[in-house]
Amino acid sequence: MLAGLHLIVSCSATGCTDNQNSLPLAGFYAMGSDTKITPDSIAVEGIGAPDDSLLLSPGTRVSQLYLPFRSNRKSTSFCIQYREQQLNYPELYDTLTFDYDAIPFFASEECGAMYHYKVTRFTYTRHLIDSVAMTDSLITNVDRETIKIFFRTASEEI
């Protein structure tokens, strides 16, 4: 009886239910800690991306953001703009650049093909970003945070 139940459960005709995109997920953190932050006055856009490349609008509060890589390029860059009044100067904007190899990956007949990305190097400016860390250099379609961006944040003095 249990063997027959196993066959029914494991045989599915629903098609591909896996995530079909390999998108790096970045989390925002306070410098020197693993405390997530949700900045409300930043804009994030792709540099040199076609059409509208705005990924995050000021006023939107998130603690994570997908940073899509371009499969037809060897690197992708993003600009983080600080739109808070006292920080809204282009010379304070930060840039993140990721160099990678795009690796074609055939998931299955139902899911088709996609790209995985192997990050070979990443650089960033340090205006309001303190540091950037990657938990894994291989970006796949598994929905998990692989990039941590640590920001300098205001702290209260006692």
Image (cartoon, rainbow, N blue to C red):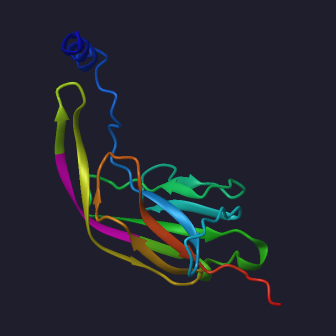
* Whole-percent x, y for residue 18 in the image: 33, 33
Q: Give left or right: position of 40 versus 7.
A: right
Q: Residue at x 68, y 58 (%)?
A: 58
Tell me if 76 is positioned left or right of 149 in this view.
left
What residue is drawn where x is 52% and y is 50%? 52
Q: Residue 125, relative to residue 84: is it above or below?
A: below
**Residue farthest to the front?**
1
Picture quadrant where residue 153 is located: bottom right
Q: Measuring 52% from the left and 60% from the top, which residue is drawn there? A: 45
Residue drawn 35% across the image and 37% down it: 19
Instruction: Determine the image quadrant of residue 13.
Output: top left
Q: In x, y percent, where is residue 88?
A: 70, 74
- Magenta highlight on residue 65: no
Residue 27 in the image: x percent, y percent? 51, 62
Residue 111, above or below 35: above
In-image side of 99 versus 45 (left or right):
left
Q: Is residue 102 magenta?
A: yes
Q: Nearer the viewer, residue 118 or 42?
A: 118
Q: Which residues are magenta?
A: 97-104
154 relative to 141, above or below = below
- Magenta: predominant secondary structure element? strand
> Where the N terminus falls, by quadrant?
top left
Measured from the top left, where is residue 38 in percent x and y? Answer: 66, 61
Q: In the image, is 158 to the left or to the right of 19?
A: right
Instruction: Please identify the quarter of the rendering in which residue 108 is found.
Output: top left
Report the quarter where the C terminus lies: bottom right
